[in-house]
Image (spheres, helix red, strand yellow):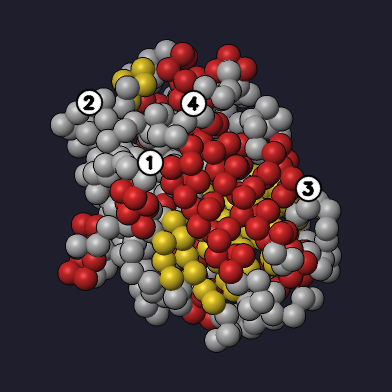
Amino acid sequence: MAQRPNLLFIFTDEQRADTLACYGNTTIQAPNLNRLAAQSFVVERAYCTQPVCTPSRSSIMTGYYPHTTGCIENNDPLRPEHLTLAERAPDDYTCTYYGKWHLGSELVPQRGFSEFAGIEDGYRAHYADATEAASRLSDYHHFLLANGFEPDGGKAAHGRSAADSGALRTFSRQTAAEMPEPFTKASFLGARSAAFIEAHAHTPWIHYVNFLEPHMPFDGPLNDLHDPANLETGPAFLRPPDADASLVHRTLAAYYGSTDWRGYDLRGEAGWRTLRRNYWGLVTLVDRAVGRILAAVEASGQADRTIVVFTSDHGDMMGDHNILAKCTLYEEAMRVPLLLRVPWLSDSGRRIDGAMSLVDLVPTLLDLMGVDAPADVQGVSRADVLRGAADLADNDVIVEWNGSHNSCVWPPDAPPEAQRIEADPWRSILSRDGWKLNASASDQSELFDLTADPHELTNRFDDPAQRGRVRGLLGRIRAWQTQTGDAAPLPVV
């Protein structure tokens, strides 16, 4: 093990697993991430704890489930009693966080990090300390000003400006597609992170960098990089759920399949393909910034003592099951890439079979860094799996949905029924033998055989032959609930 190893934790927002070659996508242009995967442990099936930003981030940063952190929907601030990895790090580490935070104030250094470099101005209404932060604007805002742009201060945060239907929300009055690549958020974070790494070549550090891309609204300077006619798709693409699927999944598909969503006509295949093409372009934009960061690690002579993590807070449906965005319990929204480069354990790619939750990252990384995680952390260290002394063969993964009352999915004029079902809790178990149960006490539950039906086209929940399996999986969810203090209702079978 390296003495006083560094930790470089890179994560994106809304990036599904199958956007990298190591997960089967050989067309998308991501050479730097593909090179990192070739040097890393690649977790075959990695899952977020809840497929929406704030809850998932709370688990990534602390090692606790969302129902424990209290971050059960977007913009819930992270409670002080749940410590981040940075707050558990040895005192001689310099800990920094660049990019989107979404767990409270975006712009004030906090939670063990001595420096924040913010890119978001649109969340100020939700700041944990609104008084202190109300007059602040992000580092990215000031970067744009210094380079001759006119930032809007987050007024058009994630949609088209009400004042100008042609303006898009890059915190600039230029559209995202027109913004030159060197001035995008991704490039800003790549350059700023590389400078930090080069300046700290001789002291231990922990550096988190979170890219907004490829998060909606899916527009950027590389929109035209990929051919929309040559996008890899699967059998679930533009196929609405069957009548025996959950109401929430059927309602989402009906909504997105009949809408002109922010200028993308999703009533036909061409609109979906344009959207997916742009999404791929944003992945490439991130890849180029990641390449700059990794080059700084190499050039400064720190590669042999730097753990590198790459993952995302959740995925995106991108037209599979005729649904967009996250907030569903389909694989495309829950499953994310997870690469871990640990130089002293392996310098070539090795696949980790089985399923792993992102709640396990904090204890795993502390273990790799020689720091003991407290016993009450709900995640489990998987460092022994990386060392080859254990595996994930017997591991179940639980994914939560705790409801949302801040319109994670729906616009304000959405049908009342859609808004109601979004607020109902679910629990999903991904079992060690390849079955998946999405359990709801108020909706149609779903059971999928991911081995025979990886695209989740056939709901087996009401199959009489599966009654025993359903009861067994519900029993395992209840055991997890007892262990973690979860009280979400489950169906009675």
Mark 1–mark 3 CB contact (< 8 Å): no
Q: Quadrant of residue 397?
A: bottom right
Give the Cα distance between marks 2 and 3: 43 Å
- The answer to whether any part of residue 163 appears in the image is yes
Nearer to us of marks 1 and 2 is: 2
Mark 1 = which residue?
443
Where residue 383 appears, x then y in whole percent? 73, 69
| Residue type beneath disc 1 | Asp
Instruction: Give 194 or 324, whichever is nearer the viewer.
Output: 194
- Work out whether mark 4 precedes mark 2 in sequence or the reverse, and give the earlier one: 2
| Residue type beneath disc 4 | Asn
Report the residue at 55% width, 31% height from top: 280
- Work out whether mark 2 precedes mark 3 in sequence or the reverse, and give the earlier one: 3
Nearer to us of marks 1 and 4 is: 4
Give the Cα distance between marks 1 and 3: 42 Å
Mark 3 = which residue?
38
| Residue type beneath disc 2 | Ser
Where residue 301 appears, x then y in whole percent? 74, 66
Report the residue at 47% width, 65% height from top: 97
Q: Is residue 436 above or below residue 228?
A: below
Q: Is residue 296 above or below residue 440?
A: below
**Circle 1 crowding by C-alpha within 10 Å: few under 14, some 14–19, many from 20:** some
Give the Cα distance between marks 4 and 3: 27 Å
Q: Is residue 302 left or right of residue 135?
A: right
Nearer to us of marks 1 and 3 is: 3
**Circle 3 crowding by C-alpha within 10 Å: few under 14, some 14–19, many from 20:** some
Give the Cα distance between marks 1 and 4: 38 Å
